[in-house]
Image (cartoon, rainbow, N blue to C red):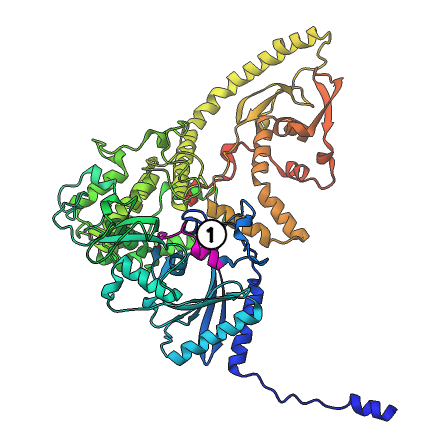
Amino acid sequence: MLNEDIEEQDGYHYDFTTASEWEIFIARLEEIIHEWKVTHVPLKSNLKHCQLFTSSWETQQESLSFADVDFTLTRYYAKITEEEEPTNSLLDNDSEAAKLQPLEDMMSMENDFIPIVFEGNRSHPHLLTRWYGLRDFIVLTPAQGVVVTSESKIKILLSSVCIAVNNTNCSVPVFIQVLEPWQNFFFGICEAKGVRAEYEMVHLRRVPPHCKHLTGLLNVFKSKVGTTKLAESVAVSARLCYVLRDWTSFAWMQEPPDLEFLMGEVGVGELGTLPFGATFDPVSELVLYASWYGLRESVVVDSESYSDLDPSQAPEWSVAIKMADKPMCLLSEYLSEFMHLCSNNRSMADLLGDLLQHQQPGPTLTASLNVLTESRVPTISKVLGQAKGTFVRDKTREGPISDDLLMPLLYFLFPDADENMRSPYPEYLTNFLIKDSKPNQEMFAGMKTAPVDSLVWRLAVVMSHATHTLGGVKAAAHLWFEFCQELRFRWERAIPIPGVVRVFPDSKTCLLNQKLQMLNCCVETKTKRENALLSSSTDDLLTDDSEDDEEEFFDCEAEAEEFLAAGDIPQRRRPKHSLWNKPVGRYKRCENLRLLQTGEYMYIPVTQDPTPKTEDQLEEDERVMLQLGTDAQGMELRTRMMSASLLSDMESFKAANPGAELEDFIRWYSPRDWVEEEEVDEFNQKKGHLSPRMQLPGNMWVEVWMAAKPVPARRQKRLFDDTREA
C-alpha cells in the first residue's frame, strides 16, 4: 500500500487544453471589469435637469490587445453626490429586483439635448452621454490609426463584449467604436437581471425624406418596438437647429487693430499696452436652437405638409457658436514670439555683430579702493569679468532699432531721464508705505511677477513690441543691450533705478525684479559709503574735544546727582580714555544702561546694514550649508558663515563702548538672555547673569566675542560688497 501511495503522488497530470488568443482577450476584459467593480451596481437617485453636463466626469483606462491590434478600454462616469436615497418609485413593482440604472437614465427626459463642448478631438461630456443619457458606461476603442471596418471583426468584438458582460454580471453598458473616428460610430450592449439592451446606430450620407419630420421618426420608432398601437402615447423631445454661416453684411463691432504700430510717431499710450483681438471675426458659425421637452405625440403634428413646431413659440431658445480654426490673434502672436526668445542661445555679439566693440575695463578709483576690502584671492566672477571685459556700442553704426524709435522706448522705461517726463511711474512704486493703491495685488498673489506698470512690467511690454514689430530677436537684443548700458551708467553715477520699489529684494516677485531691487540697494549703499567717507574726517576733528567735555559733564554732575540721590558717594572717577582707546562709531545712548565694569553709559553702535539677498542667492546659501555636512569641520564652517553679521555687530559694540564685556553686549543685543536680579550693584543698576543657553560650554557667542576686535562699522570689511554685487 505504501508503494502504491508513492506512485500516485509522483504521477504527472498533463493538461492538453490551451487558451486561444480570443479567450485571453475575453479573460482580460473580465479582469478589468472586476477591477473597476462595475458588477451589481446599486440603483441611484434620479438625475436632475442638465446634471450630466454640470457634473464633473472622471475616467479609468486600461490597455489590452487582440489579434495584433491594441485596444483601450475606458470607463466614463459622472461624479454625482447622493443627496437622497433612491425612492421606492425606482423599484419594479412587478418583481423584487430593481430596474437597471442605464435604462432608467435613458428613459429620463431631464438631460435631453445637453450641451457638448468640443476640445480638439474630444467632447465634454462624451457624445454617448448626449445620445443615451448615460451616467456610467465603458468604451472599447482601437489604437490610434487603426480602423475596424470589417463586419466579421465587428461581430467578434461584440461577441467578446457580450461574453465578458454575462460572465461578470456587468450592469454598466459596454460600447465598441468602429468605422472612421470622425464618424463617432458605436455599437453597445447592456445585459443584467434578465434584461438586455442593444445600442445600435445608422450612419447615412443623406437623410431619407420620411425621416426629416417627426411623423416619420415616430413610425420608425414604433416599427422597431414591434407594434403600431401602444398603450400610452409616445413622449417626444424636439429641437430645431438654425445655422448662420455668413454675416458679411453686418459690421464687426470690435475696432480693427493698428497694424502700422510704431511705424510713425510713437506715443506713451501705445507703448504701455499690447494689442488685443483677432484680425478677423473668430466666430465661423452661429447656431440657434429652439427646443421642446416632454411633448405627447397626440398634441403635436410635424409632417411634410404641416408643423406645429413654430420656432417663435418654442419654450426655450439657446445659442451656440463655432470658432474659426486657429484664428490670427494679436496678443497670442506677441506672446508666442516673446516666449521663443527663451530658447534662443545666440550671444549678444552674434546678434548685433559689428554694432558692439569689445573694451577692457580700465583702472578706476572705485576699483582701487575695493582692494582694501576685498580678499587677496580673486573670485571666479572677477577673473571671468576681467577676461570678458564689456561691450560698448559703435556710435558710427546704426542698430536694428533706429535712434528715432529707440529714444522713446528708453524714455518710457526711464522717464526721469526725459526733461518732459511724459510717463512717470505710479506713486506706490516710489513710496512703499502707500496701501490699497496697488492694483491687482490679490490677483497676482500666487504668481512670480512684478508690480503693475513697474520697470520690469514695462520692459516686458516694450520687449514684446520690439520682437514683433521692430525686427525680431535682433531688435530685442539691441533693446536689452541699451537697457543694460543704462543700468551700468546709473550704477557708476549712483543714480537710483526708477520703477522699482526701494526695499530689499521681494521674493514674491520675479527674479529680474529682485535683481533690479538689489541694484538699487547697491546704489543706496554706495551713496551712503561715499558720503560717510567725505564727512568722517570732519566728524573726527569735531568730536575730539566736544565729546570729552560732554562725557565729563555727564560723569560729573549727572552721575553725582544720581549717586547722591541714592545715598552713596562715588568711590572713583571715570578713567579718561587713552588716545588708542577712544570710543568710535556711536549712534546714541542706550537709555540709562551702564557698563558693568566701568559704569559708563552704554551707547548703541553704528552697525552695518543687513545683507540683502535675492531668491537665487538664498537657495545657493542653503545648498552650501547642506553640502558642508554634519562633521566637526562642517559645523565649524557653518558657524563661521552664520556668525559673520554677529562678529560685525560685536566689533562695532566694542569700538563704541571701550571696556565692555560680553554681558554688556547681551543686555543690548539679546535682552532675553540676561536674567536680572533684585540686588543692585555699585552703579545703582540691577545685577544679573547670563541665561543657561549662554553658559553652555563651546557657546558660539563667547567664541565670537573673544575673536572680535574694537573696529567701527565704517572700517570693517563690508558684509555687503555693493561693488561686486552690482
374 and 526: which is toward the camera: 526
**In the displayed structure, does residue 142 sit left or right of residue 18?**
left
Residue 466 image point, x, y percent: 23, 49
Task: Name the quadrant of the N terminus.
Answer: bottom right
What kind of element bears circle 1?
loop
Write the residue at 48% across / 64% down: 173
Decide: is 361 above or below 659.
below
Quadrant of the image occupied by residue 431: top left
Amino acid on which disc 1 is placed? Pro
Residue 559 in sight from this viewpoint? yes
557 and 705: which is toward the camera: 705
Q: What stretch is highlighted in magenta?
A: 102-116
Decide: is 194 above or below 591.
below
Residue 368 in sight from this viewpoint? no
Write the residue at 70% across / 89% down: 13
Residue 170 image point, x, y percent: 54, 65
- Residue 505 counted in the magenta span: no
Which residue position holds label 1?
378
Please tell me how crowded label 1 is: few (under 14), some (14-19), or many (20+) other residues with Cα within 10 Å.
Answer: few
